[in-house]
C-alpha cells in the first residue's frame, strides 16, 4: 500500500485541479467569480492586508478565519480569484484524500480511477454554487472529523486523547469559519458520552473533553490574539455573534421558507431534491452501514442529525448551505468501490475499464448539470465589472463604493480596496450600515459609485458615466439579467 501511495496522491491531486478548474468560477477558465459572497470574502481579505481591522474597520458577516484565508489569496492576486482558485484546489484535494483513505480501510482493491467522476458529481451540484463558499472551505475539516469518528470501534473503544485534540482543532477552525456548521461536533460529543456510558468508561470523559477543548483553544488562539491585539474583541462578539443571531432575518432581503419543524423538513426536502447525488450517496452509505456495522450506522445517522438541523435552521436557507453534507457522502463512496473491488479481485482489467467508463459518465453528467459552465471562456471585456474598471483606472487615486447590493466584483476587477467600513449592502437590517452608506452618497465620499438595478435617487453629487447589463446565475435561482450603473463624482465647474 505504501509503495503505491505516490501514484494515488498524484491522481487525486490532478482530479482536484481539474474539478475546481472546470466547476469553480474562481478558476482561470472563467473571467470572474461573479458570485457576490465570494467577492465579499476577497474584498475583506484585501482590506485586512491594507491594515484595516476586521469588523471594526471593514464589516462582513462570516468568521475571521475565512477572511484570513482570503487575505492569503489576495497576497497571490488582489485583482483576480487566482489565489482563491488555489485555496479551493487545496480544499478539494484534502477532501478527496480523506474520502480515499476511508475507502482504503474498507475495500481490498478500490479504484482511484473512480475519484475524478465522484468529484465531478460532487462539485457540479447546486449546493456547490459558484465556488468559494464557507461550506466548501470547511468541508475537509468536517470530512476529516467524520472519517476519524466513523473509523473508531465504538463497541469497545473511544477516541484517544490525541484524536480528541485534533478533532478539537478542526472544531475550532470550523467555529471561526461559520459557527452554524458546528452542529456535527455537538452530535459527536453526545455520541462519545453515550459510548463511554455503555462501555462503563466514565473516567475517560474528562480527559477527552479536556483535550477537545484544548484543541478548540489552540485553533482559536490566533483569532483571539488578533482581536485582542487590535482592541477589537467587542467588535468580534457584536458582529460575528450578536448581529448574525439577531439581525439576519427575512426582512433584510432574504427569502425565508417557513419556521419550526415543518419549515425545516421542507428545506431539507428541497436540498435533497436539488442535490440528488448527495441523496443517493447518503442512502447508499446508510444501507451499507446497516448491513456491515450497526455502530457505524449509528454514528452516520448521529452525524447527519447533528448537522442537518443547523443547515436548515436559518430563516433564509440558501442552496449552498447544503454543500457541507458532502462531508458525509464520502461514506457512500465505499459501497460503490466495494463492488469494483470485488470485480478487481477476479478481473483486474475489467474493473479498470469499468472504473474509467463510470468516471467518464459521471464527469460528463456533472459538466452537463453544473450551473456555472455557461460562463466558461467568456471574455473579460464583455463583463460590466471590467468595462467599469477601465473607466475607474483612468482616474488617479480613485475610490469606489458598491452601493445598494452585495459586492458585485467591481472592487476585484478594478483592484481597489474599499476605504469605508461598510463597502456594500449586506443582508442584515443594521441601521448603522444603512445610515453610513446613505451618508457616503450624499456627501460624495468616493470617486465612483456602482449600483445594480436602480439608479441613484434624489440630489447627489454624482453623474452617470456608464451602464451595462449582464446575466447572473447563482445557486438554484433562475438566470437573471442585471443592469449596473457607474457614477463618478461631479467635477467642480471652472
Image (cartoon, helix red, strand yellow):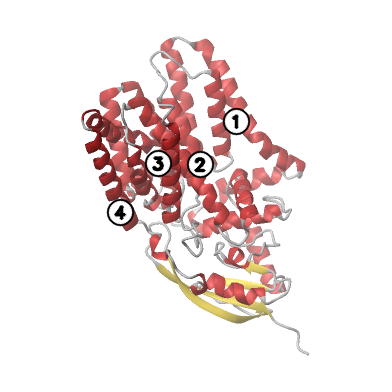
Q: Residues within 10 Å of mark 2 (few under 14, many from 20)?
A: many
How far apart are labels 1 and 3 at the CA level? 23 Å
Q: Position of residue 374 (x, y in %)?
A: 39, 64
The residue labelled by disc 4 is 364
Q: Which mark is residue 138?
A: 2
Q: Position of residue 344 (x, y in %)?
A: 25, 32
Q: Nearer the viewer, mark 1 or mark 2?
A: 2
Q: Which mark is residue 216?
A: 1
Of the residues under marks 4 and 3, which one precedes in the sequence?
Answer: 3
Q: Residues within 10 Å of mark 3 (few under 14, many from 20)?
A: many
Q: Nearer the viewer, mark 1 or mark 3?
A: 3
Which of the 4 image quadrants contains residue 436? Answer: bottom right
- Residue sitting at 64 percent across and 30 percent down? 218
Q: Quadrant of the C terminus?
A: bottom right
Of the residues under marks 1 and 3, which one precedes in the sequence?
Answer: 1
Of the residues under marks 4 and 2, which one precedes in the sequence?
Answer: 2
Q: Are marks 4 and 1 in contact (CB under 8 Å)?
A: no
Q: Nearer the viewer, mark 4 or mark 3?
A: 4
Amino acid at each position: 500500500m505504501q509503495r503505491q501511495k505516490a501514484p494515488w496522491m498524484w491522481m487525486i491531486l490532478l482530479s482536484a485541479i481539474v474539478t475546481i478548474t472546470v466547476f469553480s468560477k474562481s478558476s482561470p477558465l472563467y473571467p470572474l467569480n461573479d458570485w457576490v459572497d465570494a467577492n465579499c470574502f476577497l474584498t475583506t481579505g484585501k482590506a485586512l492586508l491594507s491594515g484595516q481591522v476586521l469588523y471594526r474597520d471593514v464589516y462582513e458577516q462570516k468568521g475571521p478565519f475565512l477572511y484570513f484565508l482570503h487575505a492569503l489569496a489576495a497576497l497571490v492576486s488582489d485583482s483576480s480569484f487566482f489565489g482563491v482558485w488555489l485555496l479551493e484546489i487545496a480544499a478539494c484535494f484534502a477532501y478527496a484524500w480523506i474520502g480515499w483513505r476511508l475507502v482504503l480501510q474498507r475495500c481490498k482493491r478500490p479504484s482511484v480511477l473512480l475519484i475524478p467522476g465522484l468529484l465531478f458529481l460532487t462539485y457540479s451540484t447546486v449546493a456547490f454554487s459558484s465556488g468559494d463558499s464557507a461550506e466548501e472551505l470547511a468541508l475537509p475539516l468536517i470530512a476529516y472529523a467524520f472519517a476519524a469518528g466513523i473509523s473508531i470501534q465504538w463497541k469497545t473503544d473511544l477516541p484517544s486523547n490525541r484524536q480528541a485534540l485534533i478533532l478539537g482543532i478542526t472544531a475550532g477552525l470550523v467555529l471561526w469559519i461559520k459557527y452554524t456548521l458546528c452542529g456535527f461536533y455537538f452530535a459527536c460529543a453526545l455520541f462519545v458520552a453515550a459510548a463511554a456510558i455503555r462501555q462503563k468508561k466514565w473516567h475517560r470523559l474528562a480527559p477527552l473533553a479536556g483535550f477537545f477543548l484544548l484543541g478548540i483553544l489552540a485553533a482559536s488562539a490566533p483569532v483571539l490574539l488578533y482581536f485582542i491585539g487590535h482592541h477589537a474583541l467587542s467588535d468580534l462578539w457584536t458582529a460575528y455573534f450578536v448581529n448574525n443571531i439577531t439581525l439576519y432575518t427575512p426582512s433584510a432581503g432574504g427569502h425565508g421558507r417557513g419556521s419550526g419543524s415543518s419549515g425545516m423538513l421542507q428545506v431539507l426536502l428541497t436540498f435533497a431534491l436539488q442535490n440528488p447525488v448527495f441523496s443517493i450517496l447518503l442512502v447508499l452509505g446508510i444501507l451499507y452501514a446497516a448491513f456491515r456495522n450497526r455502530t457505524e450506522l449509528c454514528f452516520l445517522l448521529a452525524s447527519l442529525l447533528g448537522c442537518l438541523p443547523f443547515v436548515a435552521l436559518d430563516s433564509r436557507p440558501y442552496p449552498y448551505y447544503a454543500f457541507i453534507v458532502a462531508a458525509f457522502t464520502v461514506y457512500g463512496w465505499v459501497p460503490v468501490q466495494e463492488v469494483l473491488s470485488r470485480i478487481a479481485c477476479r478481473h483486474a482489467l475489467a474493473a479498470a475499464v469499468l472504473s474509467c467508463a463510470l468516471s467518464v459518465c459521471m464527469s460528463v453528467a456533472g459538466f452537463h448539470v453544473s450551473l456555472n459552465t455557461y460562463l466558461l471562456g467568456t471574455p473579460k471585456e464583455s463583463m460590466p465589472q471590467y468595462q467599469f474598471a477601465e473607466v475607474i483606472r483612468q482616474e488617479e487615486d480613485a475610490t469606489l463604493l458598491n452601493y445598494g447590493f452585495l459586492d458585485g466584483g467591481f472592487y476585484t476587477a478594478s483592484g481597489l480596496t474599499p476605504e469605508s467600513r461598510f463597502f456594500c449592502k449586506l443582508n442584515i437590517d443594521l441601521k448603522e450600515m444603512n445610515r453610513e452608506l446613505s451618508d457616503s452618497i450624499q456627501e460624495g465620499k468616493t470617486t465612483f459609485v456602482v449600483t445594480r438595478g436602480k439608479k441613484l435617487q434624489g440630489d447627489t453629487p454624482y453623474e452617470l458615466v456608464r451602464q451595462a447589463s449582464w446575466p447572473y446565475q447563482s445557486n438554484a435561482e433562475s438566470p437573471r439579467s442585471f443592469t449596473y450603473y457607474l457614477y463618478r463624482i461631479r467635477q467642480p465647474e471652472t
